[in-house]
Image: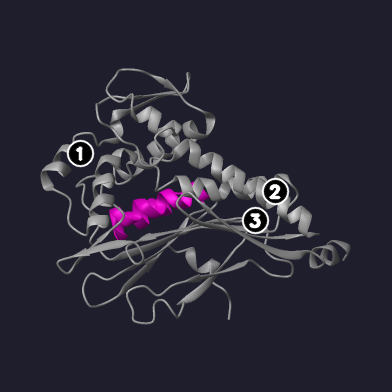
Amino acid sequence: MLCAASALALERHEFSRPQMGMRFQITLYAADEKTAEEAASAAFRRIKEINAIMSDYEPESELSRLARTSGSGQAVALSEPLWFVLSRAQEFSRRSGGAFDVTVGPCVWLWRKARREHRLPDLAALAAARKAVGYKNIQLDPKRRTAKLLVPNMRLDLGAIAKGYAVGEAVAVLRERGIVRALVVGGGNMAAGDPPPGKPGWRIALPLPYSPAAEREPARHVLLSNASLSTSGDFFQFIEISGRRYSHVVNPRTGIGLTSHCQVTVIARDGITADGLSTCVSVMGPKAGLKLVKSTPGAEVFITQKPGEKVETFESPGFAKFYEKP
């Protein structure tokens, strides 16, 4: 009874700051405003530190400095965070047969330019960029914690994994400061700690993509507790040229933005797994993607796609346990 009463006495606090090129939100329950503000500030600092290490926009980030050594034969010592994320990225690449590949950066860079200029990337430039793509061109040495980029002109893009890592790290920082009831959201990635007082979980809306009411009416809600969620797809981030929609998710095998009209939501035990798997499934498609998720302990997936006029949905057997009960 005392624990329940103490939990109910906690106050809800919300914080928001621009981080990693988007707005991150932290919702937490704390005994007072000062405790809440100090904990949230520490979590935001951690996200900023991660961005300083893993951004491919910042020329002096650790990731960018590593990329500049590509083709030199130099083995570069990595910080613990970058080593961990690159190791997990390579794991996803192996498990997905290359559907997930952080070396796709040269192609992603061309598609970013295409979105700004509202035109397709130059095909010759894409062909040249693809010569530097291939996850096997990253050589990791676990004993020395070093990375060697084997071919010239490589550019690493951690956009499909770093934000998932960041939201998970932010929740861990809050927990270290005694804040266990928290939700951290960054774009399509979120990580949840314990649920709000008196609630079974954090209530998260799953949107209805590819329908006229998609932005107004969530299809259903899931409840998150000590889990992470990541959504990837072309519903909110895309470029449309000559009537064809290209996703911001680039297929590493082709160098082309996905055109499959697919949205993937993965719930997993940690943010980096949810983020990585959602991209894997987006590229692999429902059949192979479901198989990959089923082989990942603690992970579940919900897929919506529109191959033509009809909207199709797929979900792994255990996803239903996260649905809010009526």
The mark lying in front, picked from 1 and 2, is 1
State the image coordinates of residue 53 (x, y, percent, origin top left).
Answer: 48, 36
Looking at the image, residue 221 sits to the left or right of residue 302; the answer is right
User: Which amino acid, mark 1?
Assistant: Ala
The residue at which mark 3 appears reads as: 193
Question: For the residue labelled by badge 3, is the local secondary structure a helix, a strand or a loop?
Answer: loop
Q: Earlier in the sequence, mark 3 or mark 1?
A: 1
Q: Quadrant of residue 66?
A: top left
Q: Tell me residue 187's x, y (percent).
A: 47, 59
- Is disc 3 in contact with disc 2, using a CB cutoff of under 8 Å? yes
For the residues marked 1 and 2, what is the alpha-carbon distance in whole angstroms? 42 Å
Q: Label 1 belongs to which residue? A: 129
The secondary structure that most of the magenta stretch takes on is helix
**Secondary structure of residue under mark 2:** helix
Count residues near mark 3 (Cα–Cα under 10 Å), then give few for <14, some for 14-19, many for 20+: many
**Residue pictured at 34% horizontal, 67% vertical:** 235
Residues drawn in magenta: 271-297
Snapshot quadrant of residue 257: bottom left
> In the picture provided, is 93 more to the left or to the right than 251?
right
Left/right placement of residue 79 relative to residue 140 reads right
Q: Amino acid at mark 3?
A: Gly
- What is the distance, in whole Å, between disc 3 and disc 2 at their CAs? 8 Å
